[in-house]
Amino acid sequence: MSAVADLRLAERRALATRLRSAISRLARNRAVLVGTAVVGLLLTVAAMLATGRSGDPLSLALPLALLVGVGVAAGLSSRRMSSDALELQSTSALQRALLDSTVDGICLTDLAGNPVLANAPLQRLVVELGLPLHGTVAERLLALADRTTEPARFSERMRELGRDLAPSEDEFELAESGRVFRGYTAPVARRDGTVVGRIWTLREVTADRRLERLRDAFLGAVSHELRTPLTSMSGFLELLGDSEHELGPAGRKYVDVIRRSNGRLRRAVEDMLLVAEIEAERLELQPTATDLAELATATVEQALPAAAERGVELLLEADGRLPLEADAGRLRQVLDNLVSNALKFTPSGGSVEIRIHAEDGEAVLEVQDTGLGIPEDEQDQLFERFFRSSSSTEAAIPGTGLGLTITKAIVERHGGTIGVESAPSAGTTVRVRLPLQTKLELGLPSREIAA
């Protein structure tokens, strides 16, 4: 019995707790509180009229009490509403200050493209650029078309933005002032995924573009100026080579140092000129029927002496012929860059393996080493100009940081892709995919060359 009594007592307490919680929630709800008081007042007046006790003091006291209750409830509700309004106003002012303090011009539009909210930087840009004050954002920006360096492309892009809500990123330059702007758009959605509008962001990148142009001009000028003395040095080195046997051991050693340094400087100059061509979109290819396996074999054979000198094992595994429609010279440059990089970053006793095979209609080239590896947070920057990983600088490994930039550009110009997998002290694997020219000829023996 005691257990049953305890159970009933617990149930009653739980029920009382739920009732108190429900009453508390109702009391905090302003609409329910005021509504309950009004309904009670109306019911009381109706009861008075039905019973004919309008002259009874008690009957007069009850409506008065209810009126006082309604007044108190309304006062509390008004106070709470005022407090909420002040808090909302403060939050809105803070959010507005945050938007106005950004460098970018930001605008929120509805689904039709009409502005709903714009921050101060965007409002200043609207005045500076002389944009119309009416219409959708796409229509207002379209007014800039004739003032840009690419009117037709800009007009078409603005029309696309007016029709499509997909995320976008664009850049345009004003012809008369040289000012360059980069714009971003993205749909705005609720938590349930319903799209309710779009955010537009406009940023001026004029200084960045001018710096890039100055850097490109500097590289081009330096490269061309260096070519002339390098050509003279190469010519005199050839003349010295004809009479090198007449020099003593020290003289021959000096000539060898000059020859290696001249070659290294020439490669650096050629790389800088090639990067300038790539940036100017002037990289030209001369595609012919090419076998990737043959190019890899030639690259490995040429690199074997350097691998042996460093004490690194160099292996090649190729599954038959891999026919491509490609520029053989440029692809050879890709192979040379990847293999030389792998050898430079692999210490003595390590290995570099080149694997070539067909997969899903593509030729796959993998260069895997057991070298220093690359930190994960630096891998996204590997293909940027002049970037050198922390592992290469700490190990004092020479280089210009242009090899992978050139490699990526050549691969992409062939319609391929390139990616990197690496970890510190665990080696690096570079994977290149290129479209095959024809169906792979199977059944041919694999080639394997080892240092």
Image (tube, rainbow, N blue to C red):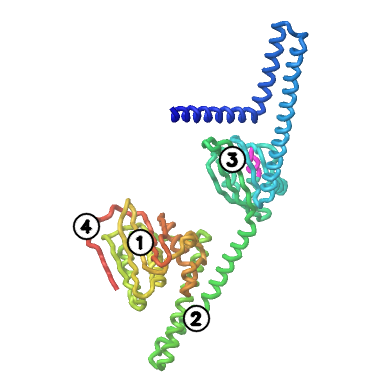
Q: Position of residue 309 (x, y in %)?
A: 35, 78
State if disc 2 and disc 4 touch (CB < 8 Å).
no
Q: Position of residue 5 (x, y in %)?
A: 47, 27
Local crowd size for mark 4, using a 10 Å CA cut-off: few (<14), some (14–19), many (≥20): few
Q: Nearer the viewer, residue 46 or 132?
A: 46
Image vertical order of residue 109 relative to residue 400, above or below: above
Local crowd size for mark 2, using a 10 Å CA cut-off: few (<14), some (14–19), many (≥20): few
- Residue of label 1: 366
Cα gap from disc 3 to disc 1, whole angstroms: 43 Å
Q: Mark 3 or mark 2, which has the lower sequence index?
A: 3
For the question of whether residue 149 can be seen, the reply is no
- Residue of label 2: 232
Q: Could you say whether the residue bearing mark 2 is in a helix, strand or loop? A: helix
Name which residue type carries label 2: Ser
Q: Mark 4 or mark 2, which has the lower sequence index?
A: 2
With 325 as the anchor, is 107 left or right in this view? right
Q: Mark 3 or mark 4, which has the lower sequence index?
A: 3
Q: Mark 1 or mark 2, which has the lower sequence index?
A: 2
Q: Could you say whether the residue bearing mark 3 is in a helix, strand or loop? A: strand
Label 4 vs label 2, nearer the camera = 4
Q: Which residues are magenta?
A: 136-143
- Residue of label 3: 198
The image quadrant where one finds the N terminus is: top left
Which residue sits at x=46%, y=76%? 264
Badge number at residue 443:
4
